[in-house]
Image: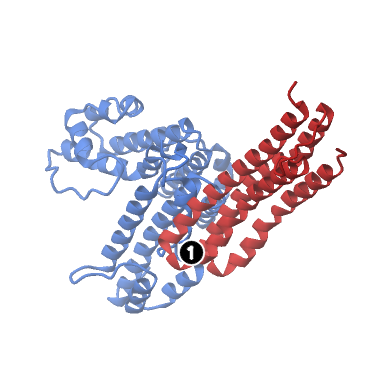
Amino acid sequence: MGEYNAYGKKSYEYAIGRIKATSHPVLTGEQWSRLREADLAGAVKLLEEYGYPKAEEGETVRDSIDKEMQRAVSFILELAPDEELTNLLFFEEDALNLKLFLKSKLVKGHMDNLPLVEGSFSPELLRICAETEDFSLLGKDLERELEGVGDMEDPFLISCTVDNAMFNHAVEGAAKKHCSALKNLLTEYGAGRNRLIRMRMKRLGREAEDFAYLPVSFSEYRAKDDKRTDDEILQDVNRRLSSVLTDLGYDDGMGVLAQYYFQKKNEAAALRLLFARKSQEATGGNDE
Amino acid sequence: MANIGIVITVCGAALCAILAGIGSAVGVMAAGKASAGVTSENPDLFGKVLVLQALPGTQGIYGFLIAILIMVRVGLLGGNVANLTAAQGWQFFFAALPMAVVGLISGICQGKAAVAAIHMTGKQPDASGKGITMTALVETYAILALLASILLMFGITI
């Protein structure tokens, strides 16, 4: 209800103002170039200069990246005018946590020390749902989508069902809230994911089952992708997502929050890859 | 019978002050929220965003000015109230309308432009001058409406 409060502190004008002026902006192209060119120690130092938290003793640069991502999530949640809408951004994190609980139950493992990530649903709630196989606490649409997932024994099927349910929940939630900016972003993101899934399956010489794809149409890309190389597909997926993210920057509402979160998330993923490669090079491993 | 011309004239003056005031209040409120967001992250930008926040406030001043001028013109402030016909009253009413309507709309629009400029300043503090210029351009139409209202008002024969 925050967005309808004309006098409240949590308005989109306020939230966007904070994001635009934040001291933790997304890395620029020039900063990325410097990071790529530096050696491991130099890149770690540069990352600290760019506002990432310093790794404590016994921690690695990966911990710094994780901390920065946690800070970004807390920052967005703190200033979000519409909490319900903002929670939809974390559909992948919720899916990951639920999958961990369901698969842990499947192998009769302990659920106490799972590598959970910060999402919108509390881990305790997801754990109860997984243990009791009752998903009504997550809302009617998720209860319907997750029906029967407790009886599944194929981990791949569990993953796909949970991913699809959480993705659908996010897209439908954005549509219900009339947030076209978030809906467009999720649709483009889902289509991109589907194209990458298909590309990977083709590499393995297989055709993916229908349930492996996120429930968003990408038929318009199929014929074109058949004529493209993997690199071309990857570039096109990145280009389309970047284009949608850039457009979100001109939004005067939720779009800017979604843009910041997805850019930070992509940045964290790219930094993890960059530093993994640099660590490999530093230890004399083969970077290919 | 009460002086119907004065009643209509007062309605016009009040409407002008009210609508232009609402436009400015909404514009300044939106810009204020954006300023609060930017300033909470970077307090050094307070001076730059304050100018931008103040810009949509001028419509309210113009509306107030027209209301005062009308009151002076018909003698409401001087104690010697003119005896106006209904036709003269409507003339004053419509003379106030340009400032009333344009003040309302341009105040809100300028507020939106100020919000965007404040966000731009938050991202690029050196671009605040450009933001002020862009926001000030909306002011042109409020000034034109102010001139139209003044010229119309002084063209009325009492």
The quadrant of the picture occupied by the N terminus of chain A is top left
Outermost residue toward the top in this view: B1
Say what amino acid the circle numbered 1 marks: Phe
Q: Is residue A284 left or right of residue A183?
A: left
Q: Quadrant of residue A105?
A: top left
Give the percent coordinates (x, y) of residue A116.
23, 48
Q: Quadrant of residue B54?
A: bottom right
Q: Is residue B131 left or right of residue B93?
A: left
Which residue is depicted at the point 50% across and 68% down? A29
> Which chain letter goes with mark 1?
B
Question: Badge 1 local density, few (<14 within 10 Å), some, or many (20+)?
Answer: some
The quadrant of the picture occupied by the C terminus of chain A is bottom left
Q: Is residue A6 left or right of residue A106?
A: right
Q: Which chain is blue?
A: A
Near-viewer residue (B27 or A286): B27
Q: Which chain is red?
A: B
Q: Which residue is mark 1?
A: B46
Residue B10 visible in image: yes
